[in-house]
Image: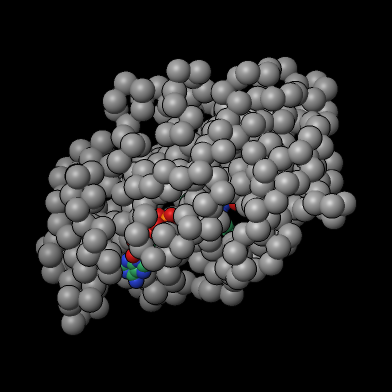
């Protein structure tokens, strides 16, 4: 199968648009025609070369939606024509992780996924005979892509694929981090560091959880208006303060917030996010992804005195069992997605989408094949 795709040949270089070869699905695999994909900061992070798991050449992309084209031997839960959202966090329902009831992290395909390969240790992508790696088990920057059956959530045929693609990462991650990871209670105070799609989705989740005060923090003040529309009540630009930002938040909230979320990937801000939490009970959730070699630090006394540090991947959401419900909640107006889409473009303009994200001029660009 020939497929339009954007190849990441090497770190730090723009993607190259090409026609690649995609092999059909093997046993337990599914070929999907991606209808729409957006660009998440994690794609830019991996392309930058900062991702310890970054492998080149590869086909990036993990926030997409599409239609099943063909299924491999033994696939029973999906058929051609089904609408699906690719999952970078699979759900096999059988591994120790899936059975634990404690996490959404599934181990069934994660080892090979991290090596840019399908579960049998090979790749389905090539260009002029040269093998190309998969990425995050999804590779949505190819019109035709191949995934393990366990890495696909079957969703309503009624839902617009060029909107619900955002449930493949950004919107779900932010809302899930609030509802599943932090379990924010009504009346809580919340601080959100970084107002890209993830931070805005956290704000949306905090409003769904009936937080009383939602403090939106960003060094780009252009982000505040959308944050306000999603329910933020206070707006803080660290550049306007000459005390450390954690001190400014503590002063604003009579001792600190109940919950904070780091949605940037900056280890210094992760420390601020922890330290702006209230003594005795404040919890800080790390969502941002930090580069190779980076480490977080704080005085252990911060934890001894009751603050809690946590992390969240894909918002703690189990994709196959829970994502169809997220799609339904979008369809009945309980979850907002459209407001995140600041640009729509043909797939061929994918490098412009990366530029807009880097320039702080987009929340999400949806690319249409
Ligand atoms: P984005 O680039 O759209 O948003 C980041 C925001 O942070 C921008 O508005 C930027 O102005 C702001 N910012 C940068 N430095 C700042 C600072 N020092 N103080 C305050 N604000 C600052 O990115 P995104 O797509 O929303 O992704 C955010 C982060 O979340 C990335 O690190 C991404 O890799 C990560 N992520 C993690 C998961 C997960 O499951 N854990 C899922 C998706 C994305
Ligand atoms: N590969 C990196 C870490 C990347 C990372 O943390 N990915 C997040 C999803 S970001 C989506 O935009 C995640 O869910 N991680 C859990 C997992 O299993 O990958 C590294 O540091 O090696
Ligand atoms: Zn993402």
Determine the residue positioned at 17% across, 60% down: 235
Q: Quadrant of the C terminus?
A: top right
Question: Can residue 106 be seen from the camera position used here?
Answer: no
Question: Where does residue 329 sit, x and y in percent of width and height?
Answer: 36, 25
Horizontal side of residue 90 vs 212, given as left or right: right
Question: Where does residue 91 sit, x and y in percent of width and height?
Answer: 62, 33
Task: Pick the residue in front: 310 or 6.
Answer: 6
**Residue 47 in the image: above or below residue 231:** below
Ligand 2 located in image quadrant: bottom right
Task: Pick the residue in front: 191 or 284.
Answer: 191
Query: Which image quadrant for residue 88?
Result: top right
Determine the residue positioned at 59% across, 64% down: 14
**Residue 154 in the image: above or below residue 253:** above
Question: Where does residue 357 sit, x and y in percent of width and height?
Answer: 42, 59
Question: Can residue 195 be seen from the camera position used here?
Answer: yes
Determine the residue positioned at 39% across, 74% down: 268
Determine the residue positioned at 48% across, 30% down: 161
Tally of marks = 0
Task: Pick the residue in front: 3 or 9.
Answer: 3
Question: Where does residue 131 sit, x and y in percent of width and height?
Answer: 83, 53
Please identify the residue farthest to the right as the structure is shown.
129
């Amino acid at each position: 199968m020939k497929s339009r795709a954007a190849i990441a040949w090497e770190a730090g270089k723009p993607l190259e648009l090409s026609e690649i070869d995609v092999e059909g699905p093997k046993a337990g695999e599914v070929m999907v025609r991606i209808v729409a994909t957006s660009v998440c900061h994690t794609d830019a992070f991996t392309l930058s070369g900062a991702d310890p798991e970054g492998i080149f050449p590869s086909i990036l992309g993990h926030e997409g939606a599409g239609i099943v084209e063909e299924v491999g031997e033994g696939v029973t839960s999906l058929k051609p024509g089904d609408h699906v959202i690719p999952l970078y966090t699979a759900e096999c329902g059988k591994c120790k992780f899936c059975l634990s009831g404690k996490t959404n992290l599934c181990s069934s395909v994660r080892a090979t996924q991290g090596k840019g390969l399908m579960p049998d240790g090979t790749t389905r992508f090539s260009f002029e005979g040269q093998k190309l790696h998969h990425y995050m088990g999804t590779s949505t920057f190819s019109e035709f892509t191949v995934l393990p059956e366990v890495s696909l959530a079957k969703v309503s045929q009624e839902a617009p694929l060029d909107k619900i693609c955002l449930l493949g990462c950004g919107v779900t991650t932010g809302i899930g981090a609030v509802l599943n990871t932090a379990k924010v209670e009504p009346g809580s105070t919340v601080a959100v560091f970084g107002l890209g799609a993830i931070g805005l989705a956290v704000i949306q989740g905090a409003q769904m959880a009936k937080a009383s005060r939602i403090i939106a923090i960003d060094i780009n003040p252009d982000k505040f208006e959308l944050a306000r529309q999603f329910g933020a009540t206070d707006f803080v630009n660290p550049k306007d303060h000459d005390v450390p930002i954690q001190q400014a938040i503590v002063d604003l909230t009579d001792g600190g917030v109940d919950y904070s979320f780091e949605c940037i990937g900056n280890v210094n801000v992760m420390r601020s996010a922890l330290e702006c939490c209230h003594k005795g009970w404040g919890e800080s959730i790390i969502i941002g992804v930090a580069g190779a070699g980076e480490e977080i630090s704080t005085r252990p006394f911060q934890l001894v005195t009751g603050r809690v540090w946590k992390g969240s991947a894909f918002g703690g959401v189990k994709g196959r069992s829970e994502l169809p419900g997220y799609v339904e909640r979008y369809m009945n107006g309980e979850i907002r997605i459209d407001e995140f889409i600041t640009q729509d473009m043909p797939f061929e303009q994918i490098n412009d989408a990366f530029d807009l994200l880097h320039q702080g001029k987009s929340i999400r660009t949806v690319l249409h094949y």
